[in-house]
Image (cartoon, rainbow, N blue to C red):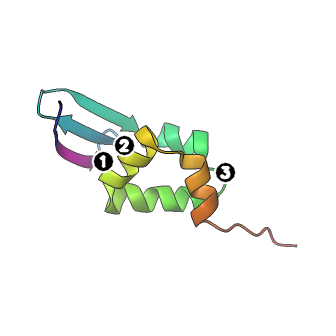
Amino acid sequence: MRKLISCEFNMDTICVELKFSDGSMIAIDTIAVENEVADNMYQRSELDYLIYNAPVAYADLILNGDPETYLKTVTEYKPLD
């Protein structure tokens, strides 16, 4: 079983990088994820918060969760009339 040894945001590649004990690595392209799942600036802001402050939670959400449902639940977007 692979054990996660590090997870951090790499500013050079704009990726959240996960490194495992067996030497494997996963890099999540954060720009591509935002373009795919975020519909507005509030959702992008929530993803940015996770990227910078909780990269493990971000990686778990993207790899194992449902980011669209999460973003609709935690963000409230009310267009101006």
Q: Residues within 10 Å of mark 1 (few under 14, many from 20)?
A: few
Residue identifier under label 1 = 11
Residue 16 location, x and y as percent? 32, 43
Q: Main secondary structure of the magenta part?
A: strand
Q: Which residue is mark 3?
A: 39
Point out residue 55 in the picture as x, y percentages from the top left corner: 32, 53
Per the image, label 3 sits on a secondary structure element best described as loop
Q: Position of residue 8 (x, y in %)?
A: 25, 49
Disc 1 to disc 3, C-alpha distance: 23 Å
The type of residue carrying mark 1 is Met
* Residue placed under numbered mark 2 in the picture: 14
Q: Is residue 57 left or right of residue 77?
A: left
Amino acid on which the number 2 mark rests in the picture: Ile
Tag 2 and tag 1, C-beta contact below 8 Å: yes
Query: Callout 2: 10 Å neighbours few (<14), some, many (20+)?
Result: some
Coordinates of residue 74 in the picture (x, y in percent): 57, 65
Label 1 residue SS: loop
Give the residue displayed 48% in from the left and 45% down from the top. 65
Q: Which label was assigned to residue 42?
A: none
The range drawn in magenta is 5-9
